[in-house]
Image (cartoon, grey):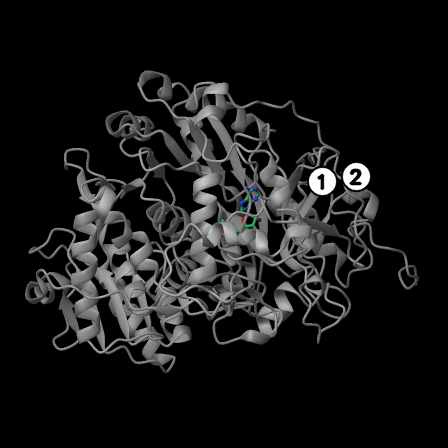
Amino acid sequence: MANTKKTPELTEISEAQIAVHWREEKYYHPSAKFKAQANMRDPRILKKFGLDKFPDCFKEYAGMLTWFKPYRKVLDTSNAPFWKWFAGGKINASYNCVDRHLEKHRNKAAFLFVPEPEDEPDVALTYQDLYNRVNEVAALLRDLGLKAGDRVTFHMPMVPELPITMLACARLGIIHSQVFGGFSGQACGSRIQDSGSRLLVTMDGYWRNGALIDHKVNADIAVKTAQEMGQDVDKVLVWQRYPGKYSSKTAMIQGRDFFMNDLLKQYHGRKVGPVALPSEGALFLMYSSGTTGKPKGAQHSIAGYLAYVTGTSRWILDIHPEDTYWCMADIGWITGHSYIVYGPLSNAATSVLYEGVPTFPDAGRPWRIAERLGVNIFHTAPTSIRMLRKLGPEEPRKYNYRFKSMTTVGEPIEPEAWRWYYREVGKNEAVITDTWWLTETGGFLGTTVPALHPMKPGSCGPGAPGIHPVIYDEEGQEVPKGSGKAGNICIRNPWPGIMQTIWGDPGRYVKTYFAKYNKKPKSKNWRDWPFMAGDGALQAADGYYRILGRIDDVINVAGHRLGTKEIESACLTVPEVAEAAVVPVTDELKGRMPEIYIALKPGIQPSREIHNRIVKANEDLIGKIARPKEVYIVPDMPKTRSGKIMRRVLASISNRRDVGDVTTLANPDVVEQIRHMVQGKEAAVSKAEIPEDIARFGQND
Ligand code: WTA
């Protein structure tokens, strides 16, 4: 009975192991030229946004907006932790992003749309054009009977019609919910159901990697899925990629599907006054993955959100109306909402909107676009940086563009990739802001203020102005400041960009982000409600944070969050599958990818065909981004004696690490069989330090 005594399992991560060792990187300093032109170059601002000045410091951001009625209270905490920012005010996001710029910037481009086919001309949309088109769509939506508080789901690609429709909703107070265009019809359908939308807005097709993709087909699947889940969709509005021409093979359904182009004919020149909406109204929902299989709709407010993205676009992205700004993210993610649409437009930016893949037709494409359009602020994710570096390390040199400022977002960036970005893309001249934040936070949490702080590769920097991070250990003790010890990063204070709640599930909001570290559940004092971001992090002696990755069951694939439970549920839709376990594995380009372990029902033999159906189930139910790196059909899952699947053992195997002592498992032999299957007989185990998120993965199983 060797295994009955309570020896700690070696697969458990001890406190000491969590203290991650990493080389201190040297600083890079912003140039005098950059500093001289920066929107925020007054070092006193950091004090002005000190915790002792909270919450009044954020009046500064509210002051960047145009209000229909001034707010009464900066922060109302009476229903903590459901914060109400700028309470009592009346405002409209569409007015702030469009109408108020007409006087000065009427004929300046709001968007420069770059189609993926290189022979198709760019389209410049001036603020006047944007105003006209937003009004026409708003008039149409109003005539369809939609009003403030109703939800509308979009499943749109990266085309100007997406921000136009968003702003039309915002004009009336309709809550938009854009589902990333690359998600499947089913994924869209379940989000339609959750939000209770009766209207879906989509496009017939769009260009991606050289092909005109039929996208309307997804709308049919989405409507069917929503209906099966109990939500009827009355109408599907279909934009045409080429107005007047239908670019899809899927039939239009009489009485349900309508071409926007046809409907809008009667609305030419129509105007709709922007509705004066309460500050605390909801602007949009953005669905994201979490610990359970059900995506959660992060609900963002009108005034607080808009103030926060306006302020951070001005001070951190350093957008001036004279700049040409390009964020390569997709508007279907929070980065696009905050830093392609609302933040930049509120600052009267000229923003580039690119339809396609950055490496199409070759790795020089982004730099050709930058050169042609005179882009001087560039914003992208580590995955794209790694890809562009791999495919064309010297491409940027061939093009004559000059960036003053660059951003990275979405995943930790390796110092090597950071230095290439700095040296080759930024030509040793542009500043880099590494911005750490989440769907739920609306805008940046951790970042340097580019003219005030030096940059350090691999670290996002200190908290953004007015954001006061703290790292707690599992027991709720504060990890000493600057100690370099890892723990769970939280924000001590609320900020205007924070989500209001999870749509339809306020209990989950409190539980996910606050319950762990809140000691007084009835408290109305914001000090009792630190926000738990769900990332591991450490703080170096200089106060800079290094983000280590998710601590929950979320895999960050190419900067996009996928819940392991969502993937596992997709696998279980294949009838032969008895059990599925998903683990993150490191990937050179995408950062992390899911690997799937499957146990089949008794008597069923593994086959290529089952394997393919498992992959397809993920693509159909979630989208192509959920395609696993590998699927292993194993004889049995490693389990504890109580029958729990030991995902962390599988994660060690997938990541070529030692599995440690597994003798306490119910079926230790199967571990060696699986290891053999995945790593091969002789496979050497990597001695390199295991990334924090993977080391911790499955700890809570
Ligand atoms: C990760 C994207 C390191 C993090 C805006 C977070 C980052 C998750 C960074 C949120 C960064 C985002 N450095 N990690 N600069 N930015 N992350 O909701 O794990 O799609 O929790 O929001 O991405 O992803 P989301």
Q: Amino acid at mark 1?
A: Gln
Q: Earlier in the sequence, mark 2 or mark 1?
A: 2
Q: Quadrant of residue 527?
A: bottom right
Left or right: 485, with 464 as reference point = right
Q: Secondary structure at mark 1?
A: strand
Figure quadrant of the N terminus: bottom right
Q: Residues within 10 Å of mark 1 (few under 14, many from 20)?
A: many
Q: Secondary structure at mark 2?
A: loop
Q: Which mark is residue 483?
A: 2
Name the residue carrying label 1. 539
Figure quadrant of the C terminus: bottom right
Tell me residue 15's x, y (percent): 82, 48
Tell me residue 497's x, y (percent): 50, 56
Q: Quadrant of residue 326?
A: top left
Residue drawn at the location 59% of the way across and 29% of the way down: 457
Nearer to me, 588 or 81: 81
Left or right: 570, with 247 as reference point = right
Contact between labelled residues 1 and 2, with CB atoms less than 8 Å apart: yes
Determine whether 449 is above or below 134 in the image.
above
Nearer to me, 246 or 127: 127
Tell me residue 248's x, y (percent): 15, 58
Residue drawn at the location 26% of the way across and 75% of the way down: 146
Gap between marks 2 and 1, in whole Å? Answer: 6 Å
Left or right: 75, with 145 as reference point = right
Q: Amino acid at mark 2?
A: Ser
Determine whether 664 is above or below 434 in the image.
below
Tell me residue 632's x, y (percent): 55, 53
